[in-house]
Image (tube, grey):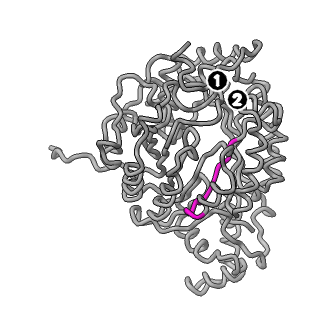
Amino acid sequence: MSASASTIDPAAVPRLGTGMKLRFDQVRGAWVVLGPERLFLPDEHAVEVLKLVDGTRSVAAIAAALAEKFAAPAEVIEADIGPMLRDLQTRGAIRL
Amino acid sequence: MTPPFPPPPFPPPMGLIMEVTHRCPLQCPYCSNPLALDPVASELPTEIWLRVIDEAAALGVLQAHFTGGEPLARRDLPGLVNRAVKAGMYTNIITSGVTLDDRAMATLQDAGIDHIQLSFQDIDPRENDRVGGYEGAFAKKRAAADRIRGAGLPLTLNFVIQRHNAGRVADMLDFAEDLQAERVEIAHVQYYGWGLKNRAALLPTRAQLEDTTDVVEAARERLRGKMVIDYVVPDYHAARPKSCMGGWAQRFINISPAGKALPCHAAESLPGFTFPNVRDMSLAEVWESEPFRRYRGTDWMPEPCRGCDRRELDWGGCRCQAFAIVGEAGVTDPACELSPHHHLMGEAAEESAAPAPPFIYRRMGALVAG
């Protein structure tokens, strides 16, 4: 993935893709992303991000919330979640 | 000494595929249903489908797929969908769309349907109607797409590709883009059952396949992040087999209209199996039954699969294809160039250079009578 493809405008507001759902599966004891004939079992970092994707929070706001939760610098978190959001976008899980 | 503990249960299935009926207004010559179609009198009653849906959710199934035949031919479909929604599963209907009128759409929306996949036979209306054997089908499908959009549901368009329409994939993708579909499947015919019967009429040449691949790859680049394009190729020009169903009985349970539980919709074609029926077995028992364990994982594999570093990527390919082409279900899929039977695929692919014979349409009794 090129640098430009993984750079995301901090003001962008991600939302779940049409028909995508984040659910906790009791049988597996794991979060799952369900969508049109596809599903993912996101890793723990992606789960933390996806829980904050609500169509109103910006990328910067998501990074700030995670920075507070995990006591880490927001700019580090922002840099970390950029490629992850791009990947989720490519899979159709979120829209940016 | 190892104590004789029973093996631990296999991880639960991800998806339940419910072929609720084999009835269909269309007669596509590549239909994925078996040549021997289940008659309406043999179809499971509503109460057994409801029980199966509840058992699936308890077992860990995440997605409930309603297909057929044409699933809308069952009047109880909205009730089945609603039960799956209430049980917490993601619900999907795979439809030809020709009977998806305003009333059907509203009823399914009320039931809580999550997603609808709408199939097309071609982007050229006349060819679409010829392949489906249904005059006026394209116009009805087009209207169904608008209804799905109007309901605010995610839309998947499915185009089935064969030698007669392989040159129009770019137009199909433009059409999907205009409709703002979330997802489009450019799915070459898979050659089992009716598709195998009609192979000489359907299989594209290698050059046609390569053209469609180029068109799909360019569109994927252009539409990245906007529309997901799933691409399925025919095995006949392949060097490696597909990971059929994500491995035998590893991700899915398929239920036939009459209640037969199968690792895939084509598995009924395999000899030497007595597949369980959900009329007399729970889905949990089905998942651990002998037919489901027979080709699960890698223990069953012969060479060259056994020592291959792709054995957990493609799981040896497709058992039904191994049987259809080689005559043995338990050998490497001949689509693999490492298979000693790979030449049989190449010889069959030569059909694609010859003029196409007429279609044998999929109809109840079409073959029994002839």
Residue name at image x 74 percent, y 16 percent: B356
* Image position, residue B66 (x, y; %): 53, 48
Residue name at image x 67 percent, y 25 percent: B237
Taking the magenta stretch, the answer to whether it contains residue B115 is yes
Residue name at image x 35 percent, y 45 percent: B287
* Image position, residue B9 (x, y; %): 31, 50
Residue name at image x 58 percent, y 66 percent: A21
Q: In the picture shown, does residue B176 fall above or below A32?
A: above
Q: Name the residue under label 2.
A: B133
Can you say which quadrant of the picture contains the N terminus of chain A?
bottom right
Q: Please tell me the numbered disc located at residue B361.
A: 1
Query: Along the horizontal axis of the image, is B284 left or right of B25?
Result: left
Amino acid type indicated by mark 1: Tyr
Check if mark 2 and mark 1 are on a common chain. yes
Q: Which portion, as a residue range, is magenta?
A: B110-119
Query: Along the horizontal axis of the image, is B8 left or right of B41?
Result: left
The quarter holding residue B55 reads bottom left
Q: Are the two marked residues, 2 and 1, in contact with CB atoms closer than 8 angstroms?
A: yes
